[in-house]
Amino acid sequence: MNPTLVQRAQQVLRANDRSGYTIPTAGLYPFQWNWDASVCALGWMQFDEPRAWLEIQTLFSGLWTEGDYGGGSAGLLAHITFHQPADSYFPGPDEWGTQALALRTSSISQPPLHATMVRWMLERAQDRAAAEAAVRGLLPGLLAHHRWWYRTRDPEGSGLVRILHPWETGMDNSPAWDAPLARVPATPRAYRRRDLDHVDASMRPPQSFYDRVVYLMDANRDAGFDPQRMLEAGRFQVNDIGIVCILQRASRDLAVLAARFGDEAAASEMRLHVDRTQQAVAALWSDRWQQPVSRDALTGELLDQPTSAGLLSAYAGFGFDIAPAVQAGLDETAYGVASTRRTAPTYDAPRYWRGPVWQHINLLISQGLAEQGQAALAARIRDSSVRLFERSGFHEYYHPETGSGLGGRDFSWTAATYLHWIAGQPA
Ligand code: DGY
């Protein structure tokens, strides 16, 4: 543990605090993001427990309800919640067609880390009474959100939820989305990207990507945010192995929380989903890369790309042996698990989700491996992360070969990951 880095990490969170929620970084991402919020809460937990719980409570204040757009999307926890206006980001609050919401949000979701992070926070809390009250208050929203995933994104009960927009995966520009995204039309409307005002184009998705994600954003509005119509019209539908893993882990943790707080019926309901997904996930195994991968839900084809998303399968508890794939990936880079394997033809070291290292993903992969009994491999990932934090501070992501910081600076979830994983735990 490095006291200077601890202090700097805390400063990053405080500087990005906007009265109850944490922006990922100033300028580039000026609102509250869904999966960022839970990682930030882990970091706050190390030095300000009430603020940590508030982060998640503020996020869930944007949960869609029965009164929103006919109620079909009740339980949607959006990928961005627009608590206050800001004009440094596209697409901002006026772009999504969600003007009728009391609290404006986007119309898509993001990886549901929350139940797991809440369980970890509960386990570490010093103020037990406050933590138990907070978890009790969060449980209905957590359950509503998990039900939204299963009800609207896997209505036939296949065990594998589907996503309708690359931004839902959080791993926006992954090479796994290239083939399904190529079938999506480019938007005919004019718009201005704002990300390139803040970050070099070599680190960001190309224009062809933006033309298609804007098309998909507008399609949700045109479907009236009705889940059935969105599925019928959806030009991009993917069983994302990242979301499948994160939801699986979160539903296991939610079952534990529900049982602990006296809701045995909800616990059994979550366990049923977990069992169903455990049966279905075998279909996503890639012989080529020796790890599970995503699948195009419209064509049934595997999206056979070696991305870090599939390495979350140990964290999910699926039981695949991914140790050889992790080992091989680590041997190819100097600084931890790359978002896309260096030996893949699609690898692009500095570009968003096509090569760089994300520290919170390293944390989840390492945690999963440790739980699977792969202590040495888990420690190797953690050690590489320590070297990255000490070398380059708290960037959005990092070059896997040189370790240089990329993307946004003074990045909240990176600082939070340091506080939780490195400063908060013995070596
Ligand atoms: C962006 O704008 O790049 C975000 O990742 C979308 O959530």
Image (cartoon, rainbow, N blue to C red):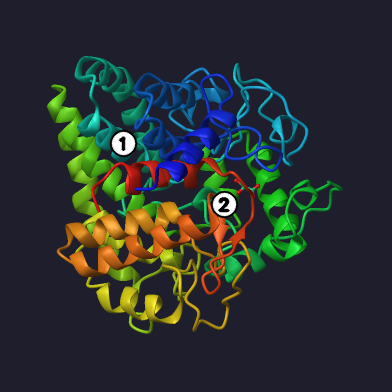
Callout 1 crowding tier (Cα within 10 Å): few <14, some 14–19, many ≥20: many
Image x and y of residue 202, in percent? 72, 66
Q: Horizontal placement of 257 versus 159: left or right?
A: left
Instruction: Examine the rendered structure and indicate whether residue 210 appears above or below residue 133.
Output: below
Q: Horizontal placement of 348 versus 64: left or right?
A: right
Q: How far, Cα to Cα, is label 1 from label 2? A: 23 Å
Q: Residue placed at 59% from the left, 36% from the top?
A: 107
Q: Residue placed at 21% from the left, 15% from the top?
A: 129
SS of the residue under disc 1: helix
Q: Horizontal placement of 378 versus 75: left or right?
A: left
For disc 2, the marked residue is 396
**Amino acid type indicated by mark 1:** Ala
Q: Nearer the viewer, residue 82 or 238?
A: 82
**Amino acid type indicated by mark 2:** Glu
Residue 30 seen in this snapshot: yes
Q: Mark 1 or mark 2, which has the lower sequence index?
A: 1
Which quadrant would residue 313 be assigned to in this image? Answer: bottom left
Q: Which mark is residue 115?
A: 1
Residue 112 seen in this snapshot: no
Q: Residue placed at 61% from the left, 35% from the top?
A: 106
